[in-house]
Image (cartoon, rainbow, N blue to C red):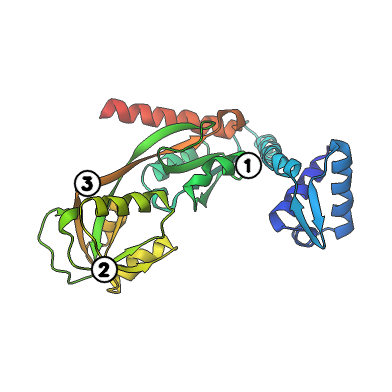
Amino acid sequence: MELRQVEYFLAVVEHEGINGAAASLGVAQPTISQALRGLERELGVQLFHRIGRGMVLSAAGRSLVGPSRQILRDVTAVEDLLATSDGALAGRLDVMAFPALAIGPLVDLVTEFRRTHPNVLVRLGELKDEAQAGSLIEDGHCEFVVAHLPLDDARLDVLELGEQEYWLVYPPGTDLPEGPVPLADLPDVPMVFVPRGHSVADEIEESIRHSGARPHLAALSDHREARLPLVLAGIGGTLLERSIAEAAQDRAVVRRAEPTFARTFGIAFDPDMLSPVGHAFVELVRAHTSNTEHGS
């Protein structure tokens, strides 16, 4: 197996076909086709099902995606290491985080890591579905995932980073008493939620219903970042992560919920798939969590 074949294979996967792969790599389509056929002959398996002009990964092809990305990550790390004159750690740190968790402890960890290892490039990606954490790591999209806990994947090691609290946020002018608002006494204001099937959203909605409250639904938004603009526009109220809610206190009516609704979150990884950069980051995270526990 040649590195060029691995690069071509992943390009076809990521661009969903030879045409897009050829355009992105700047090579002729027959060159990629020939490389793929050679790779399949060498491995003795069919990596793609050819359907008309389209290409769909076979079961064997899907199982090769993660190891292929790991190969390229390791090669890049070696190249970067050789390019540094002092032998300092180099390469890339790939982290995918649930949007609301891409702040706070994660930012502190990345900042400290970059300060210690300035030759490492950090890539922060968006985790849209926390249920996909395991498959994203297995397929090599990233080495680390930051998500709410627990994660239903026994293959992953998890280090807890903290707890995230959710606060009530209502349109400007909403008449609410000072202090925490019991879920059972929510104001008669429609709510803005994300669709069911998102773990945190489901738990929030279930907590409200369990309290006996039955607020009307004003809007469902697949775009989590649209909730605050919808609230500020007067569409309805919602529950937002505390940091986001506090930042909006001068534009909206913000209150703590009672009882408090909170979820722990952490960073997950597969210890068997870590690059040298990944191992260094795990050491930093372990030190951070240990210091946090001793300081509490």
Residue with the mark numbered 3? 260
Secondary structure under the numbered disc 3 in the rendered image: strand
The residue positioned 39% from the left and 52% from the top of the image is 100
Secondary structure under the numbered disc 1 in the rendered image: loop
Of pointers 2 and 3, the one earlier in the residue sequence: 2
Res 271 quadrant in image: top right
The residue positioned 27% from the left and 28% from the top of the image is 295
Q: Is residue 70 left or right of residue 1?
A: left
Where residue 26 appears, x then y in whole percent?
80, 59
The residue positioned 45% from the left and 32% from the top of the image is 158
Mark linked to residue 190: 2
Q: For this rendering, which residue is in front, 136 or 202?
A: 202
Residue 58 visible within the image: yes
Of pointers 1 and 2, the one earlier in the residue sequence: 1
Of pointers 1 and 3, the one earlier in the residue sequence: 1
Question: Which quadrant: the N terminus?
Answer: top right
